[in-house]
Image (spheres, rainbow, N blue to C red):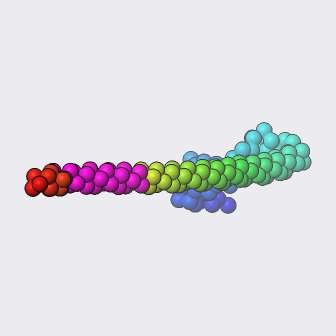
Amino acid sequence: MVDHRRCSGVLAPPPSQVTSCTVSRVGTKHSTLPLGVDVALMSPGQGSWSSHTARRSRHSSRSSTTAEILNFTKGVTDNLLKVADQLRVDAVHRDELAKIREQHFVHDATHREEAAHAREQNLLKNAAHRDELAYTREQNLVQDAAPPLHSTYRAGH
């Protein structure tokens, strides 16, 4: 019996289950050989050898399909392992970059603090020097403004 869904294309089964379909002159569909089976293997003149070969072909096809599935699964597993390893390597690199950035940040902050402290010390030194100069000028003005004590004393004598 022909499964019309397979031949009509409504549902597309996996390639291992598709049988080829032909249309007779009357217009009815009937199933011929399964895909992958050679016509010479199915010839009626070879009797039991033909059925034995067909069973071996089916078994070989199953083994081949199982091997393909195992190879595919192995390939997927290998690729997943590669992706996981790359993700781990990327995470290590991100951590290293974060540490380097943190070290740069700490170094820059320390440098800024040292520079600010040096500027503050320089400002304090300059302010002390200005205060010293101002005091010296003030002392000079006081001395210049006051009459000398000994010269006045002699004038009255």
Q: Nearer the viewer, residue 85 or 118?
A: 118
Q: Is residue 100 left or right of residue 54?
A: left
Quadrant of the rendering where the C terminus is positioned: bottom left
Splitting the image into 4 quarters, where does residue 6 fall? bottom right
Splitting the image into 4 quarters, where does residue 117 fall? bottom left
Q: Residue at x 75, y 41 (%)?
A: 38
Quadrant of the rendering where the N terminus is positioned: bottom right
Q: Nearer the viewer, residue 153 or 89?
A: 153
Q: Residue at x 36, y 52 (%)?
A: 125
In the current view of this chain or complex, which residue is farthest to the left?
156
Q: Is residue 113 left or right of residue 154?
A: right
Q: Is residue 25 left or right of residue 76?
A: left
Residue 59 visible from this viewpoint:
yes
Residue 47 visible from this viewpoint:
no
In the current view of this chain or complex, which residue is farthest to the right?
48
Q: Nearer the viewer, residue 122 or 101?
A: 122
Residue 103 spot, x, y in % from top left: 54, 52
- Is residue 130 one of those drawn in magenta? yes
Q: Residue at x 74, y 44 (%)?
A: 37
Q: Which residues are magenta?
A: 117-144
Residue 31 spot, x, y in % from top left: 66, 52
Q: Residue at x 22, y 54 (%)?
A: 139
Main SS of residues in magenta: helix
- Is residue 62 one of those drawn in magenta? no
